[in-house]
Image: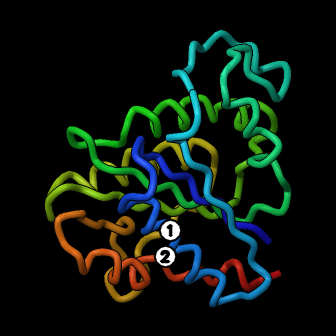
Amino acid sequence: MKIIGINGSPRKNQTTQKSLETCLDAARKELDRIETEIIELADLNIRGCLDCGYCKKQLKCKQEDDLNSLIPTLSDKNIAGIIIGTPVYLGTMTSQCKAFLDRSVLFRRNGFIFRNKVGGVLAIGGVRNGGQELTIQAVQAALMCHDMICVSDGLNTCHFGATLFSGDKAALMLTHLAFRPPKILDDE
């Protein structure tokens, strides 16, 4: 069983990456058989979708950039969940995250590969009320288009997902509360 973290930040080794690492560490502590991996979008050149239809016929994109190199990793049948982390830029996800999500349509067009996989979202704003919930909802909309199972931040609050802000050193400490591994992963 595998959980993939997608770091939608254009900056490596910052709050989004550390938050994703915290989430994935918590998942591994919950179930020792969970494998995890983080994909750094900052390292990749992924352009926006052209809606050319090329991927309707095959699990490949016509654009020759780094998205095609992710297809084997993201189409792995052992993936149980994907956690997408993004900073909040002007009230929504980063352009890197948006380009990735738009281009992920090829997984939908080729048999809904992400169907019934668990999807979680964390959003990091520069201030406490910096658009994190709106950003989470925008990412969740894309996950729902894949027929994924979107999870909240869990009991006792059951909000949209993990909302963090980089202006608070305690924010990373709260991440473990926001992303407990969903019980659905235990049902294998």
Q: CA distance from mark 2 to mark 1?
A: 17 Å
| Residue 79 x %, y % | 76, 61
Instruction: Determine whether the residue tagged by mark 1 lies in a helix, strand or loop.
Output: loop
Whether 43 is drawn above or below 18: the answer is above
| Residue 24 x %, y % | 58, 73
Q: Residues within 10 Å of mark 1 (few under 14, many from 20)?
A: many
Pick the quarter of the image with the C terminus: bottom right
Q: Residues within 10 Å of mark 2 (few under 14, many from 20)?
A: some
**With 141 as the anchor, is 169 left or right in this view?**
left
Front-most of 14 and 161?
A: 14
Instruction: Determine whether the residue tagged by mark 2 lies in a helix, strand or loop.
Output: helix
Using the image, tell me which numbered label, if any, was put on residue 22. 2
| Residue 18 x %, y % | 44, 67
Q: Which three-letter amino acid code belongs to the residue tagged 2? A: Thr
Label 2 vs label 1, nearer the camera = 2
What residue appears at the point 56 percent right and 52 percent down from the top-left corner? Answer: 6
The image quarter in which residue 98 lies: top left
**With 165 as the anchor, is 147 left or right in this view?**
right
Q: Which three-letter amino acid code belongs to the residue tagged 1? A: Val
State the scheme by which the image is colored: rainbow
What residue appears at the point 54 percent right and 30 percent down from the top-left corner? Answer: 102
Whether 119 is drawn above or below 158: the answer is above
Mark 2 vs 1, N-terminal side: 2
| Residue 34 x %, y % | 74, 77
Q: Are marks 2 and 1 in contact (CB under 8 Å)?
A: no
Pick the quarter of the image with the N terminus: bottom right
Q: Write down the residue under mark 1.
A: 151
